[in-house]
Amino acid sequence: MYEAYWGLKNRPFDNRVDTGSYYPSESHHAASLKLHYAIETRRAVAVVCGESGLGKTMLLDSILAQCPEFIAPMIRVVYPAMPAEQLLRYIARQMAPQEGSDTFGGIGHSIETIERVLRHNVADNQHALIAIDEAHLLESFGSLEPLRLLLNLATELSQAETAMTLVLSGSPVLLAHLARHSALEDRVAVRCVLERFSETETIAYIQHRLKASGWNKQHMFDEEAIGLIQEFTLGSPRKINRLCDLSLMVAFAQDRTRIDATTIENANAELSAQRHAA
């Protein structure tokens, strides 16, 4: 709605990821390197943790988009809040979609399907990847132990460390859950913890997203505005996106040519009102 007013190609602060808009902070960059290492060297388990809104999903999207060709199949579980039997059935269906959903029965059939796909993978020198979002929910449904057993199966099939890599992404409590499953925790090759942006990173993030959307002028947000953005969002990328997006809309409605502290305060007050109303 405001894109033409600001001379932008699209809304710069949408919660999306692509090659142009993704911004790796220091902790994101470190996590990316670790995850690439774990996946490309065919390690068993990689873990990425962070508070809600710090970009775990965007990081995983970026990693999966850059995986080498020998990583196949790639399974993404975005809703793991299901009993272990259903989770394994879902993974099996994703690994063998040609079989059709009606052919999948109990847990035994799911394991047979996964084993067959992994055997073919090993013969073709391919490596499976299973990435699970919101993995801290697995403990409540008793799914961590079945996943460990699935890794044991994958290990028996491969001359390397394993025939598949399991990437677990979730809130920091995931680390505590893994600590209660020492046999699975022992298989973790890398642990990544995403941190909030520093003020310097927030400035760089805002400029990066604006530039990716076609902004080629001087700073749209003045120094005081940036300080308030950091204060109100505490460096959370998702909150930065919401506040900056609304501030562009507010400034557009008020026919402003720059985002100042007053604009940020007005936008933040509106977001606060929305939260209280909800």
Image (cartoon, grey):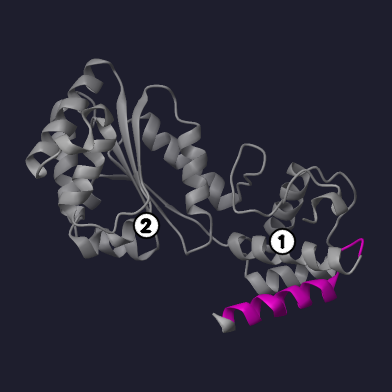
Q: Quadrant of residue 244?
A: bottom right
Amino acid type, residue under disc 2 in the picture: Glu
Name the one closer to the observer, 268 or 34: 268
Report which residue position mark 1 lands on: 245
Q: Quadrant of the C terminus?
A: bottom right
Specify start and end residues of the magenta stretch as a single range.
Answer: 256-275
Report which residue position mark 2 lands on: 134
Q: Quadrant of residue 116?
A: top left
Residue under the image location 36 percent in, 30 percent down: 41
Above or below, 271 against 47 in this view is below
Amino acid type, residue under disc 1 in the picture: Asp
Q: Quadrant of the N terminus?
A: bottom right
Secondary-structure class at tag 1: helix
Q: Is residue 258 magenta?
A: yes
Name the one closer to the observer, 10 or 205: 10
**Camera sees residue 222:** no
Residue under the image location 15 percent in, 35 percent down: 103
**Mark 2 / mark 1, whichever is N-terminal:** 2
Q: Is residue 204 left or right of residue 158?
A: right
How far apart marks 2 and 1 lie (CA) works out to: 26 Å
